[in-house]
């Protein structure tokens, strides 16, 4: 099994969330889940093997389904999607990729939108969450509003955003920010509200001001939950990017998928979906890796 | 031999401003779903500076309530509580050690002590100097950079004591700090606390349900009755505070006599 290429990205995902090394001795601070024992390495190799096998099985099923359908506009074969990947990543017959942009450029622009949109949403959600968690009467007023927004499908308020902000980048970023805000706000509010009273009291006993206690105790204690909220938020932003790119979305992976649908280029649609899904997996893997690095005390409060 | 001021020299009614802790007709009632519960009092108590007062009693005698009142976490239902002549405010005038260490897991051992110094208003340069000093005093210099979950329960409680000493407050409040530790660790921490408190000469109020611990640590032992807690026995412990080995101390006939007397009072009060 070649485990080296997939190691850096998939290694954190292969471990269960609670599979942090036992601290029998003094391990390095913020210990990385280094699999050093032969038994553990063997287990990891087996897991990678299972994943590769299931991937191959999936491809075979896909091939079978394509053959059974017999219509590439309905179910394109894996090979056709692969050809599109090559075609869209190069300049061909004077045409650059799809609609004048390479696949990576479509993806890159969408990722940039996701990054900026969810960064804005996370920042606002964090502030709102702290206020909601710390001030009871604001929670009383604002919590239903947050839940209301959370229940709306992004496409529903996108029309309003277009009326307000036009059809360029602004409404897209707004949409992603609004979609990313509620998960962070709700997670932060819950964590701040449920802050460990024992630790807050200990800080007060040491002379901490109210603000000190929030900054030094409540927020660090809430960080694991906030991080879960951030992961959810990025996930929501990801799934909303196609909605955000329904209007004037090219370049952009969602815009590309939408255009391809219009011209019944099913293989391009599938390729776009794969690109969105796989980059989403990658980003979530990075977030998880950041989490174990940034919050070594997770589960120990 | 006793290094603390003679209690007879500090009359109970006078010198309220000088007293480290002063309780006057204090009563405390908790309101709850099952109706109000009288937890404490009425109780009056004056602790002169430098004393090591141990409050002992069975569970539910209000001893932790008393400590929370002295710490300023709660206000008494009636009566007055004063520490150093003023109304108690958390973080001012008293260091507190809780039953659980209550350390911050996002900080290292020295990080926890450093934070306490910061809250006490100690400037950064001085903090860097005083952290090792405080850890040294509780015997922890070699684990300064460890994470909280990488040290034992006994070591965690030592960090908690170092943290409570960081503020240099004249008063130290301890709420059953050793109850969750194994017997051997507990004994060692008791001996170290006895030594540290004799060295610093600050006033301590220590809550426990262990008769042994009370007699070993206290310069004065107060036994509380069952809820609502009142004073059942108020006893000066005239054992040497310094210059004697813990084992020698425990072997003294006076020690055995005191332990028997306090034990008897605790059992009678709980009934």
Image: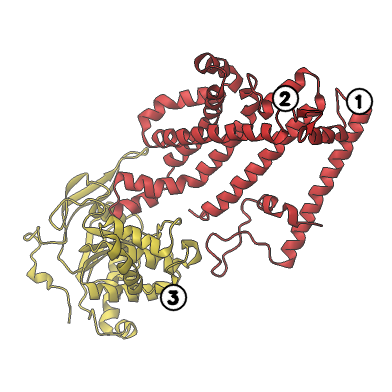
Chain colours: A red, B yellow
Q: Chain of mark 2?
A: A
Q: Distance of mark 3 from mark 2, alpha carbons?
A: 76 Å
Q: Earlier in the sequence, mark 2 or mark 1?
A: 1
Q: Chain of mark 3?
A: B
Label 3 element class: helix
Q: Is residue A84 visible?
A: yes
How far across and how far down the image is residue B137, in percent?
A: 32, 73
Residue B226 can be seen, yes or no? no
Residue A46 quadrant: bottom right
**Tag of residue A99:** 2
Residue A70 appears at what percent x and percent y?
Answer: 93, 25
Residue depicted at 81% across the width and 20% down the height:
A264
Give the secondary structure at mark 2.
Answer: loop
The furthest residue to the top: A163
Q: Which residue is mark 3?
A: B184
Q: Residues within 10 Å of mark 2 (few under 14, many from 20)?
A: some
Q: Tell me, for residue A69, which label it has, or none.
A: 1
Left or right of B234, for residue A208: right
- On screen, residue A47 versus residue B110, left or right, reads right
Give the CA distance from mark 2 to mark 1: 28 Å
The x and y percentages for residue B77 are: 22, 44
**Given the current orientation, which residue lies at the most extreme left position?**
B14
Local crowd at mark 3 within 10 Å, few (<14), some, or many (≥20)? few
User: From this viewpoint, which residue is outermost toward the front?
Assistant: A94
Q: Nearer the viewer, mark 1 or mark 3?
A: 1
| Placement of the N terminus of chain B among the 4 image quadrants | bottom left
- Decide which of A160, B225 is in the foreground and name it: A160
Determine the secondary structure under disc 1.
Answer: helix
Measured from the top left, where is residue A99 in percent x and y? 72, 25
Residue at 46% in and 62% down? B148
Q: Are marks 1 and 3 on the same chain?
A: no
Is label 2 on the same chain as label 1?
A: yes
């Amino acid at each position: 099994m070649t485990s080296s290429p997939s190691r850096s990205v998939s290694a954190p995902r292969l471990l269960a969330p609670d599979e942090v090394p036992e601290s029998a001795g003094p391990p390095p601070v913020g210990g990385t889940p280094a699999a050093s024992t032969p038994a553990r390495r063997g287990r990891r190799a087996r897991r990678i093997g299972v994943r590769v096998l299931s991937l191959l099985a999936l491809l075979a099923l896909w091939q079978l389904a394509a053959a059974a359908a017999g219509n590439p506009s309905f179910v394109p074969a894996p090979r056709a999607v692969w050809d599109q990947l090559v075609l869209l990543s190069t300049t061909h017959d004077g045409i650059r990729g799809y609609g004048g942009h390479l696949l990576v450029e479509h993806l890159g622009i969408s990722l940039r939108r996701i990054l900026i949109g969810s960064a804005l949403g996370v920042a606002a959600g964090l502030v709102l969450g702290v206020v909601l968690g710390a001030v009871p009467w604001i929670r009383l007023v604002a919590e239903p509003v947050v839940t209301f927004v959370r229940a709306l499908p992004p496409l529903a308020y996108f029309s309003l955003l277009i009326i307000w902000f036009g059809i360029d980048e602004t409404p897209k970023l707004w949409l992603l920010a609004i979609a990313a805000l509620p998960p962070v706000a709700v997670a932060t509010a819950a964590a701040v509200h449920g802050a460990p009273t024992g630790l807050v009291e200990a800080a007060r006993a040491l002379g901490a001001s109210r603000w000190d206690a929030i900054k030094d105790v409540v927020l660090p204690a809430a960080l694991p939950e906030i991080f879960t909220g951030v992961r959810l938020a990025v996930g929501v932003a990801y799934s909303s990017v196609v909605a955000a790119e329904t209007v004037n979305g090219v370049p952009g992976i969602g815009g590309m998928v939408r255009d391809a649908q219009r011209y019944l280029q099913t293989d391009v649609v599938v390729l776009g979906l794969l690109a969105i899904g796989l980059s989403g997996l990658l980003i979530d893997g990075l977030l998880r890796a950041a989490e174990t690095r940034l919050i070594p005390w997770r589960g120990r409060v | 031999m006793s290094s603390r001021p003679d209690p007879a020299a500090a009359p109970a009614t006078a010198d309220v401003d000088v007293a480290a802790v002063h309780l006057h007709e204090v009563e405390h009632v908790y309101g709850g779903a099952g109706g109000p519960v009288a937890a404490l009092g009425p109780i009056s108590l004056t602790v002169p500076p430098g004393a090591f007062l141990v409050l002992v009693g069975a569970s539910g005698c209000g001893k932790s309530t008393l400590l929370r009142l002295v710490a300023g976490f709660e206000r008494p239902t009636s009566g007055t509580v004063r520490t150093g002549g003023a109304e108690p405010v958390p973080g001012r005038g008293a260091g507190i050690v809780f039953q659980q260490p209550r350390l911050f897991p996002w900080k290292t051992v020295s990080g926890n002590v450093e934070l306490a110094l910061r809250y006490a208003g100690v400037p950064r340069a001085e903090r860097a100097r005083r952290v090792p000093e405080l850890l040294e005093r509780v015997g922890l210099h070699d684990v300064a950079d460890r994470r909280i979950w990488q040290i034992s329960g006994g070591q965690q409680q030592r960090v908690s004591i170092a943290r409570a000493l960081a503020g240099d407050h004249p008063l130290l409040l301890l709420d059953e700090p050793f109850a969750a530790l194994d017997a051997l660790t507990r004994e060692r921490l008791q001996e170290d606390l006895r030594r540290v408190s004799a060295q610093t000469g600050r006033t301590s109020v220590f809550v426990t349900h262990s008769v042994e611990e009370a007699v070993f640590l206290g310069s004065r032992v107060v036994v509380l009755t069952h809820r609502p807690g009142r004073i059942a026995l108020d006893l000066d412990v005239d054992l040497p505070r310094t210059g004697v080995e813990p084992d020698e101390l425990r072997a003294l006939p006076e020690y055995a006599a005191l332990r028997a007397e306090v034990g008897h009072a605790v059992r009678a009060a709980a009934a």
